[in-house]
Amino acid sequence: MAKQIPDLEATVRTGTGKGAARQARREGLVPGIVYGSSEEPLPINIPFNDLLKKLKAGRFLSTLWNLKVDGHDDVRVICRNVQRDVVKDLPTHLDLMRLHRNTRISLFIHVEFTNEEKAPGLKKGGVLTVVRPEVELNVLAGEIPEQIIVDLSGREVGDVIHISDVDLPKGAKVTVDRDFVIANISAPSSLRSADEDEGETGEVAADEVEATEMKSEE
């Protein structure tokens, strides 16, 4: 299933240069430029509050956006740079690059865990610990997966799930060149406590044996 691409709404910026950019900021807008795809650069303005909200949500630079500009066809873009005020750290300008459907990009994709009811380890009280709720994949702009599916069927306590254990969406490639951990199933807290108590009891018994042996030698 293709991932739903979020909208990024903008208006055409009349005029270019520092004067037009300053005027846009006074009106509560952030100036930007759209380039690439063998087309002329398009100067735009984006509402400051909308952009700030998206920036605070995170992953702005690694999110594919559906740019909507009045009088222009929707186009898929990715942000290549956000300039910020050096004092206030607020956005002052951004650069957006147009993408074709066959352009490869790297994006963070959500990890979804399924069939928890078929995992013996979880039925025994084991705990699923998610190490990576998202994984960065290199994908085609026209075939962005909605999520990565991790099947927990048959998983036992102590199992560790690596990225190599996961069937990636067609055409997707991992950006990290190592077999990293996605999640694991750890023992229930009661079992861990019992093991720890048993370990402590064993240590005490060993100490008593050692003390007895020392007395015998004396």
Image: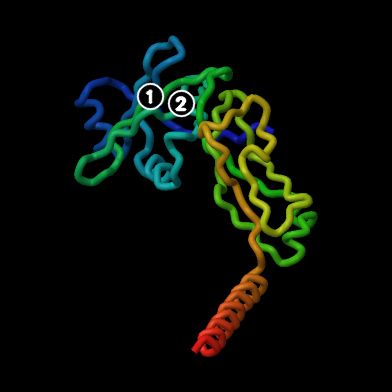
Kindly identify the residue that appears in the image at 52 percent across and 31 percent down.
175
67 sits to left or right of 125: left
Q: Amino acid at mark 2?
A: Val
Q: Is residue 122 visible?
A: yes
- Residue 25: image quadrant is top left
Find out whether the residues at labels 2 and 1 contact each other: C-beta distance under 8 Å.
Answer: yes
| Circle 1 residue | 12
Q: CA distance from mark 2 to mark 1?
A: 7 Å
Q: Mark 2 falls on what kind of element?
A: strand
- The percent coordinates of residue 69 (x first, y second) are 46, 26
- The percent coordinates of residue 105 (x first, y second) are 51, 26
Q: Amino acid at mark 1?
A: Val
Kindly identify the residue that appears in the image at 51 percent across and 22 percent down.
75
For label 2, count other residues whose C-alpha is less than 10 Å away and answer few (under 14), some (14-19) or many (20+).
Answer: some
Q: Is residue 198 above or below residue 61?
A: below
| Circle 2 residue | 69
- The percent coordinates of residue 209 (x first, y second) are 58, 83
Any mark on residue 94, and which?
none
Quarter of the image for the N terminus: give it: top right
Q: Earlier in the sequence, mark 2 or mark 1?
A: 1
- Residue 204: image quadrant is bottom right
